[in-house]
Amino acid sequence: MNLHQRGTDLINQLKDHVLEVLRSHPDAGSGGKGILQEEVARRAGLHSMGSVELDHTCGEMLKLLQREGLVENQDGNGQDEKKKGWRLCKE
């Protein structure tokens, strides 16, 4: 496996991990009120690693999943992406 394939595989694993977090939360199911990105990141273990913040990594995975039609976000307080609730799309 070359480096590009390994990177793609890692991204797919992260997306699957974020989906698993959403599936395990009662408010993140389709039709639920959604959960904040920071809650997804915390539950996924992507909120921080030492002094490095990984919340943005979680946000990027959520955006990729949204483009794939697997998750959607609910309007939150203003334009702040982190204040929007994320939930699974109807299957």
Image: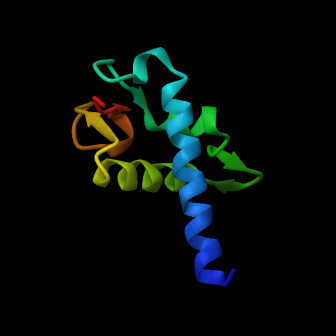
Residue at the location (69% across, 80% down)? 1
Query: From this viewpoint, is residue 25 visible?
Result: yes
The answer to whether residue 72 is above or below residue 54 is: above
Query: From this viewpoint, is residue 39 visible?
Result: no
Left or right of residue 66, residue 44 in this image: right
Residue at the location (33% across, 18% down)? 32
Which residue lies most toward the top here? 26
Q: Nearer the viewer, residue 77 or 32?
A: 32
Left or right of residue 73, residue 59 in this image: right
Q: Position of residue 90 (x, y in %)?
A: 28, 29
Q: Give the colour scheme of this rendering.
A: rainbow
Q: Position of residue 51 (x, y in %)?
A: 73, 55
Left or right of residue 25, residue 82 in this image: left
Quadrant where the C terminus sits is top left
Which residue lies most toward the bottom here? 2
Residue at the location (34% across, 42% down)? 70
Residue at the location (62% across, 53% down)? 53
The answer to whether residue 7 is above or below residue 89 is: below
Q: Position of residue 45 (x, y in %)?
A: 67, 41
Q: Position of residue 76 (x, y in %)?
A: 27, 31
